[in-house]
Image: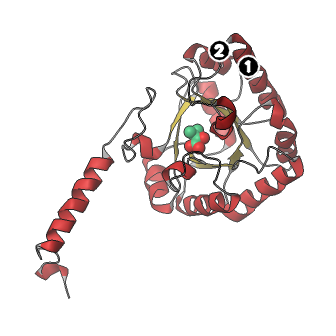
Amino acid sequence: MTTLRLSEMKSRGEKIAMLTSYDYSMAKIVDRAGVDVILVGDSAANVMAGYETTLPITLDMMIYHAASVVRAVERALVVVDMPFGTYQGNSKVALDSAIRIMKETGADAIKLEGGEEILESVERILSAGIPIMGHLGLTPQSIHKFGTYNVRAKEEAEAKKLVRDARLLEKAGCFACVLEKIPADLATRVSRELKMPTIGIGAGSGCDGQVLVIHDMMGINKDFSPRFLRRYADLHTVMTEAVEQYISDVKNVDFPNAQEQY
Ligand code: KIV
């Protein structure tokens, strides 16, 4: 999978399927199942490390997750989130961080949250030949500015800014853009106007692709139930029952049996 192929998929009207992964074993399953893009999201801060927000995850932690994912992947395009604090301030720091991700993980691209306010970093990273996926709408790294995880860009002024930011990211050369938790009509309008593919999460079916956090769609994490989430499995129950059965087997000296020992 390449960024060019994603753009061809959009031209053909073929939808793009993207999922997150953070480790080797999960990425292997996701890749072999045929997903187009694997995002090593900074949602790793939540689902892997147990932080409340995505802000605490570090560049070293993201590199660890991304390198593990890349070792598993044979087909999908691997995109890595740049963590909070590595690109918002200084474009030289942004470029250095992006280069570290590409060099130390072998990933294909990076993702940054924001529009006009991070444009200098976007341009500097792109000029080094590193492909960028944008991320507009609900940008979780700005949670302390928003104050909530509610739907964004419902008001006209914010919707206008989002359209402007999307145009700027496309003009700068981003190859795709995540649209998170915005009204479906707005996401459809932006997706129709842009040449670069849009990948929606809580942004309706008019986007060129969709992304979900793997722990959420697999039902591993039961505490998070936004309206946009469809659960494709109930791994929380499957795993709990398996662990309970194992405990019971150990306590009852049912495991290991004669065939399970040497
Ligand atoms: O970090 C993440 O998983 C993301 C997706 C929700 C788009 O940014």
In this view, 21 is above or below 232: below
Viewer-side residue, 145 vs 75: 145
User: Considering the numbered disc 2 on the image, is that residue within a helix, a strand or a loop?
Assistant: helix
| Residue 250: percent from left, percent from top | 17, 73
Q: CA distance from mark 2 to mark 1?
A: 9 Å
Look at the numbered discs 2 and 1 and tell me whether their residues touch, using CB distance below 8 Å. Answer: yes
Per the rendering, the mark at residue 178 is none
User: What amino acid is at disc 1?
Assistant: Val
- Residue depicted at x 23% and y 59%: 242
- The secondary element bearing badge 1 is classed as helix
Indicate yes or no: mark 1 CB to ligand 1 under 8 Å: no
Three-letter code for the amino acid on which mark 2 is drawn: Arg
Residue position for label 2: 189
Percent x, y of residue 16: 55, 34
Spot occupied by residue 113 in the image (x, y as percentages of width and height): 70, 38
User: How many numbered badges does the structure rendering display?
Assistant: 2
Question: Does the beta carbon at disc 2 come under 8 Å from ligand 1?
Answer: no
Q: Residues within 10 Å of mark 1 (few under 14, many from 20)?
A: many
Q: How many residues crowd around disc 2 within 10 Å: few (fewer than 14), some, or many (20 or more)?
A: few
Q: How is the image coloured?
A: secondary structure
Which is in the foreground here, disc 2 or disc 1? 1
**Residue position for label 1:** 163
Q: Residue at x 67, y 61 (%)?
A: 105
Q: Quadrant of the C terminus?
A: bottom left
On the image, the x and y values in percent for residue 205 come to 51, 21
Nearest to the observer: residue 153 or residue 130 = 153
